[in-house]
Amino acid sequence: MSLYASLCAGALFPLHERIKGHDSVARRRQLEKSQWWGVDEIRQAQTDKLRTFLVDIGTRVPYYRDLFRKLGFDAAGVRSISDLAVLPLLTKSMIRDNVERMKSVGHGPLSRYNTGGSSGEPLIFYIGKSRKSHDVAAKWRATRWWGVDIGDKELVVWGSPVELNAQDRIKRLRDGLMRSHLLPAFEMSPQNLDRFVATIRSTRPAMLFGYPSSLSMIARHAQQKNQAMDDLGIKVAFVTSEKLYDEQKAIISSVFGCPVANGYGARDAGFIAHECPSGKLHISAEDMVVETVRPDGTSCAAGEAGEIVVTHLATADFPFIRYRTGDVGLLSAKPCACGRGLPVLEEVQGRTTDFVVARDGTVMHGLALIYTVRDMPGVERFKIEQMSLDQTSVKVVAGQAFDATHEARIVQDFKARLGASVDVRVERVDAIANEASGKFRYVVSHVKLMGAAQGGTGGA
């Protein structure tokens, strides 16, 4: 670590957090100790914290006080994580209908946030200082796993309106002091990609942070321009907020000459899991309970794919309990070889809307369709949208190598997977915009999975 990074991580950033009333520094130090506890010790500490959390919100949060009373739920009697199963899953619509009643009596300062609404209507919710401190500490701990720290040069490719609209004088000063440089992920035009490549070369960051789609697009552009990027001293590329595909990981790592560290989380659910250098996604179990559930709400076994459900133990001011993320993944029963006792999220397969449903009801991951389009000559960018069981649209930004035979091949392969009667339409377009949040989604399905086994990989 450089002398300047030591100053930032050891003095400037802690002062910044203290002024804001956050205890992220103390939390990070505790997290760096608890990560080496044994599996049983972490599980017991997690259960004890869950019980305290539930007793607290059962007293101070009107929504949960009434719910616990109605269910006859004894928060003080919680003895294991499995006791959560008697509580209903929390949905976005339930939060929208009970926003004020979700706030705890006597809560501290709350900040208003909202999701980007990429999978539907945006969600408005609130975050207190405890939640912010945990999220900062959890991300900070994971950053240090890779030999980088706050104050090391960082280049961020991001598109969230919260970050982009908050570039006021104080934030610019803070980012400047912490040597964090922001590039907007909304406009990935050739001209902007040229500028992004030049900025990365001139900045020479120690780490990159951004969406897999954005960083892989920058990497591919640099490769096409024969612009070397592996001589800049980049130590790691952190990616999050989208599913990381193997080919994205490969090109980011190859072009920038560094490992790629995946992270899983969301603005509403929090920072859930981070990848360690041994290649496993570790759940921040000290403040986070992660379950996977089947479509009927029952718990999945380890290794069984299901919807990821999160209980964030640092959200007492505005609780998230058994919150449905809309993502599909599976938990592992095996500890990581790195020696950390933190539970492992074996895989995040994508959002429920990243899965497509064949005409006969078979559920498959969108990769079953992505592979066909991605490997076609001349395909520069694409998006697959399943409108219904009977119709699927494929938008393609195509180069000269893409012709009518390739269009016919897409239609043929899609029909083979979705059903011969399905109307598959290929449309050539000049550009495909990112989501409003700045993310890019290769597959979007408007077909609800209903009672089908979410996460099935038929045809993938």
Image (cartoon, helix red, strand yellow):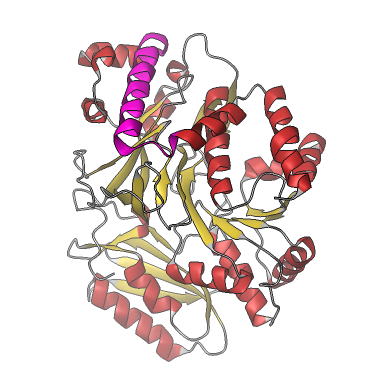
What's the residue at 73%, 64% (across, down)?
A: 200
Q: Is residue 48 magenta?
A: yes
Using residue 358 as the reference point, say whether residue 15 is left or right of it: right
Would residue 387 be visible to someone looking at this image?
yes
Residue 183, percent across and down?
Answer: 70, 56
Give above or below for 139 relative to 376.
above
Q: Is residue 86 left or right of residue 435?
A: left
Looking at the rendered structure, the number of numbered marks drawn on it comes to 0
- Residue at 66% x, 43% y is 163
Image quadrant assignment for residue 120:
top left
- The spot of residue 435 in percent (x, y) is 54, 55
Q: Position of residue 17 (x, y in %)?
A: 68, 28
- The relative height of residue 178 versus residue 190 in the rendered view (above or below) is above
- The answer to whether 173 is drawn above or below residue 349 in the figure is above
Q: Quadrant of the C terminus?
A: bottom left
Residue placed most toward the observer, 101 or 260: 260
Magenta stretch contains residue 412: no
Q: Quadrant of residue 140?
A: top right
User: At which x and y percent is residue 117?
Assistant: 49, 44
Closer to the camera in the image, 187 or 421 = 187
Q: Is residue 167 visible from the viewing direction of this image?
A: no
Q: Main secondary structure of the magenta part?
A: helix
For the residue pair 245 and 398, the one nearer the viewer reads as 245
Which region shows up in magenta?
34-61
Residue depicted at x 33% and y 31%: 41
Please tell me whether residue 420 is drawn above or below residue 318 in the rendered image: below
